[in-house]
Image: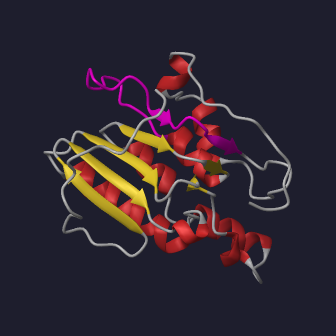
Amino acid sequence: MRGLKSPRGLAPPSPMQFETILVRSQDPTALITLNRPDKLNAMSMVLKEELIRALHELDANETTRVVVITGAGQKAFTAGADIHEFHGRTPMEQWRMYEHGTLYDAVDRMSKPILAMINGYCFGGGLELAMASQCPRRPPREVRDSRVHSTSPRPGAPVRTDPLRPRDGLRRQGGGRPGLSRKTRRQVDGPLRSRPRI
């Protein structure tokens, strides 16, 4: 699906109030927006913790049937991990921060479909989050795929330049529990360019 716009008619932010994400709900759909547009929605420790909590609460909400995750603004779904938080830390400390909160475990355990609505840059941990988004074995009829994107998605995984390996979301997508896109041979791709910074 191309040119997808944010769901209309969504209610104001729910009682779940967060610092780095927005949660809006119009039953049966819940929309989670990664809300750090000035940082290209980079996933800080706080953002990951809040995202995990929102997923847990929405999974427990009986009236929510589908969860959509997107990024604020037009530039990025998310640029991935907030590497500024890694400065001055050892590689082991960086790895522990990267694994902190088991975000992909929270996504894996969801009993409801999670759709990644990709807009613009989708790098590193952001690509992992999009790849980890999934449908249960028997998704609602209206859910066709777990990743939808704008007309100009820019996905990328800096495997050679980022020492935080292996990529958990990508490993799960390619491992023993493939997502719906692999089962249907659907995938999201985009041009790759080498740039010093976004």
Is 150 in the magenta? yes
The answer to which of 123 and 132 lies nearer the viewer is 123
User: Which residue appears farthest toward the top when viewing the image?
Assistant: 184
Q: Is residue 154 visible?
A: yes
Q: Is residue 44 in sight in this rendering?
A: no
Q: Is residue 76 left or right of residue 47?
A: right
Up-down: is 177 above or below 81? Answer: above
Query: Is 45 in front, or is 141?
Result: 141
Q: How many marks?
A: 0
Q: How is the image coloured?
A: secondary structure
- Look at 24% across and 68% down and name the residue there: 16
Report x, y in % for residue 121: 63, 50
Q: Is residue 58 above or below residue 14?
A: above
Q: Is residue 165 magenta?
A: no
Give the quadrant of the C terminus: bottom right
Quadrant in the picture for residue 83: bottom right
Give the extent of the magenta segment.
133-156
Residue 147 coordinates in the image, percent (x, y): 48, 34
**Rendered residue at 59%/48% (across/down):** 120
| 133 over 35 or under it: above or below | above
x then y, percent, for residue 119: 53, 46
Label the magenta part by its dominant secondary structure.
loop
Question: From what the image shows, is residue 185 above or below residue 139?
Answer: above
The answer to which quarter of the image holds residue 91 is bottom right
Closer-to-camera residue (67/3): 3
Q: Residue at x 30, y 23 (%)?
A: 138
Classify residue 75 by image quadrant: bottom right
In the image: residue 46, left or right of residue 62: right
Residue 43, image x and y in percent?
A: 56, 64
